[in-house]
Amino acid sequence: MNDAATSPTPAGTSMTEKLLLVLGGLATAVVLALNFGGGPETAVFVAAALTLVLLAYLLGEATHQLGEHVGGRIAGFLNATLGNLPELVVVVLLIHEAKQTPELIDVAKASLIGSVLGNVLFVLGLAFLLGGLKHGTQKFRATFASLNSIMLVLAVAAIAVPDLISFQSKEAAQHLGPLSVAIAIVLFVVYLASTYYFLKDGDAEHAPSGEHEARWSKRFCIGVLLASAIAVGFVSESLVGAMEHTIQSVGISASFMGFILVPVVGNIAEHLVAVQLAWRNKMDFGVGIALTSSVQVALFVVPVALFLSHAIGNPITLTFEPRQLLALALAAIILPNVVGDGESTWIEGLQLLALYALIAIGFWW
């Protein structure tokens, strides 16, 4: 039996990695001290941004090591799940704060759609671009990517239902609350079923390749993933808080903040992990994180955020701005055409990034 796979101690951890682990903890503590100690907004922002980059490396390395044990799909799923927890925390906090500042509801809902869009267009595009420039045409499992594409189309259709129905029927518009809850339940059930299918099927198809021996134990990999994800949650909250003050002083619109900046900044660590894996030519890992994360936001974060909004006494509905739904629909239409062949090139990445840039420009005002 491989000792590296069973030992609870990180016997294969290099001195540099140990140093980075310690620095990650210290940097997180510094960010929290600055944030809760009333430090300058600029200092909080810079410290949080640098800390997220470091945490992204730790997440990426732990995912890479775990993938040698369990396969890329399961490792990517775990990373995407942990990476979306901060997003859920930020959204719920915004909904809670909206009791005093109602416009924050719009920011929270926009960030949900923006998070899905960011993973499909920005993260996947950047991964394709940088990975393609270094390695040329890269390959990944088309079956898994196509399955996620179909799931995303389903989620987009479900999210659009309340707006479509309320637009055509004034009577239906009076029941958006119960309608949103019913749709959220359907999405959550689909999420549970797809998770079961995903994990059950992934064990056989994505067994460890054995091409490289894992240096970290399974337990240590999971520990680093959990600790890093928790740290990312606290640091992301600090970064978003500091950025909000800066954005308000500059005069950027709330739509741009919610739809573009909050999702990108809140998930920056997870985004960097996917790009880092693509740079290493680990496309099953990288594509898996980007696609799984987008589907998890649509099928898990959205309904759970709605359920929790009722629990905290500030219920939301699944109604969104028409331009937000249009942008999401464009992403859902384009995605199957990009990933369906199981290959990616840098020009495809550039096209995805160009579309994301055009959408971002449209939300500036």
Image (spheres, rainbow, N blue to C red):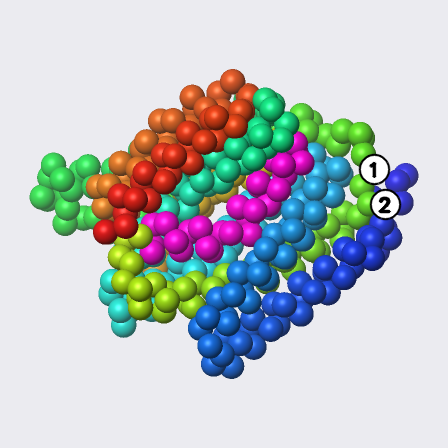
Q: Kindly give the residue lying farthest to the left in the view shown.
A: 170
| Amino acid under disc 1 | Glu
SS for tag 1?
loop
Q: Where does the magenta region start and end?
A: 257-282
The structure residue drawn at horizontal position 86% and vertical position 53%, both measured from the top left corner, is 11
Which residue carries the number 1 mark? Answer: 213
Which residue carries the number 2 mark? Answer: 4
Q: Which mark is residue 172?
A: none
As drawn, 312 above or below 223: below
| Amino acid under disc 2 | Ala
As drawn, 83 above or below 331: below
Earlier residue among tags 1 and 2: 2
The structure residue drawn at horizontal position 76% and vertical position 61%, both measured from the top left corner, is 19
In which quadrant is the N terminus drawn?
A: top right
Locate residue 211: give its quadrant.
Answer: top right
Most frequent secondary structure within the magenta stretch:
helix
